[in-house]
Image (cartoon, grey):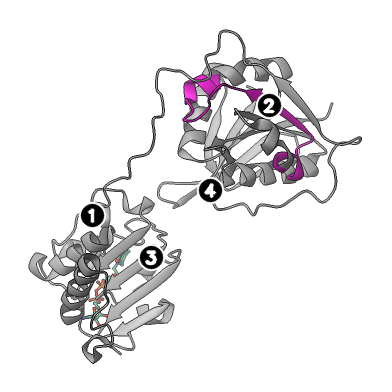
Amino acid sequence: MNKIIWVYIEVVENEIVETSLEALSEGHRLAESAAAHLAAVMIGNDTDRLAETVLQHGAATLYAIETKSADPPSPAGHAAALAGLIRDHGPDVLLFGGTLFGNDLAVYLAAELQTGLAKNCDKLAFSEKGILEQHRLCFENKVHTIEVTPQARPQMATIEPGIVKIGKASKPYRPGGPEIIRTQAAASADVDAGAAIHLGFIPADPRTIDISDASIIVAGGNAAKDVNHFAPVRELADCLGAAVAGSRAAVDNGCIGRDRQIGQSGKTVAPDLMISCGISGAHAHTIGMKGSKTIIAINSDKNAPIHKMADLGVVGDMHGILPELIKRLKTFRTTGTQDGLSDPKMDGR
Ligand code: FAD
């Protein structure tokens, strides 16, 4: 019998979360590799409107569980609603987008169904024996593991956000077109309730956030030899709502804790914006930050390796540039004007 793959579609504020479409695209690729049946399951109060998107992305069947209000959703409530459906239909594989909610829900369900779960996978494939091989990076991305759930079913995985390219299905996946099955949660399942209820998001304090999760990082290096000289790095981070980090030299100088070290013997980071201050760009450091989307490097040596990987390289003295930059950011914040931004003192090239 053909395998059955299910993908849970997360809905937030009445829209499908992008990571769910990534999980669906991975499910579609997997289904094509094994001629499996791909189904999606969605819980919400506007499932009719969203069904078309799910089916366009390759699901042959959509199980839609309509609720009174699914926003904000509860992982325990959704797990209770899904467990019965899963027991009834017995999918071989069950996938989720690896969001905070998707990971929470998957944990509840894995416990409820007494099966295994591999979180934040970057690739999935069936082995020759038809077992799902779940690839993921562990220990700060230093170890690549392949995990399997040999006996229990379904084989459950969440997909690391931002890894899988979203693709629409090129042809209808089910002869006769896709089907939508409207279903009800089991009477005993209170979809909108649970031991833990998600009330909303409170943004994390960038000063204490794990640097691996930070979207903006200001990092300092050996150019600041002590805590006092490192202070402008922290102040710039405060101004920008960024996390502070640094090179190993910054740790050795006592300027930051070891948990804030970027690099080979530290952490791997991938912020949207990295501002690197007085860091040379040694391989052991850059290996931990090369995934940064935009890099601004301030270094007085125009030949420093960090400039080669920077989107914007500022050649100049960070001890002069940072206080000036902080002053102007504060002025901008209070007055909304960018007075003096054309000042040649700021042209650090
Ligand atoms: P430096 O190499 O001393 O560079 C300081 C830079 O600041 C220079 O480029 C200089 O031009 C610039 N500068 C000086 N004064 C100013 C100024 N006033 N204004 C602007 N710029 C200025 N390192 C890590 O960072 N993370 C790791 O995880 C890590 N793991 C390692 C593991 C191993 C096994 C080994 C052997 C090394 C490891 N290292 C690691 C160390 C790494 O090789 C470098 O020695 C380290 O990254 C250097 O830190 P730095 O760039 O801050 O200091």
Foreground disc of the pair 4, 2: 2
Q: Is mark 4 within 8 Å of ligand 1?
A: no
**Sequence-first tag of 1 and 2:** 2
Dividing the image into four equal quarters, which quarter contains ligand 1?
Answer: bottom left
Q: Decide: marks 4, 3 in contact (CB < 8 A)?
A: no
Percent position (x, y) of residue 339?
Answer: 24, 80
Circle 4 Cα neighbour tier, 10 Å, few/some/many (<14 / 14–19 / ≥20): some
Percent position (x, y) of residue 219?
Answer: 27, 66
* Callout 1 amino acid: Arg
Give residue 64's mark: 2
**Image quarter (top left, top right, bottom left or bottom right) of the C terminus:** bottom left
Foreground disc of the pair 1, 3: 3
* Callout 4 amino acid: Pro
Q: Is residue 85 visible?
A: yes
Q: Which residue is mark 4?
A: 161
Residue beneath the point at 51% across and 28% down = 105
Q: Which residue is mark 1?
A: 258
Is residue 80 shown in magenta?
no
Q: Give 76 or 147, whichever is nearer the viewer.
A: 76
Distance between mark 1 and mark 2 Cα atoms: 48 Å
**Sequence-first tag of 1 and 3:** 1
Distance between mark 3 and mark 2 Cα atoms: 39 Å
Q: Which residue is mark 3?
A: 273
- In which quarter of the view is residue 118 placed? top right
Q: Secondary structure at mark 3?
A: strand
Q: Give 338 or 12, whichever is nearer the viewer.
A: 338
**Image quarter (top left, top right, bottom left or bottom right) of the N terminus:** top right
In the picture, measured across the screen, residue 342 lies left or right of residue 213, that is left
Q: Decide: marks 3, 2 in contact (CB < 8 A)?
A: no
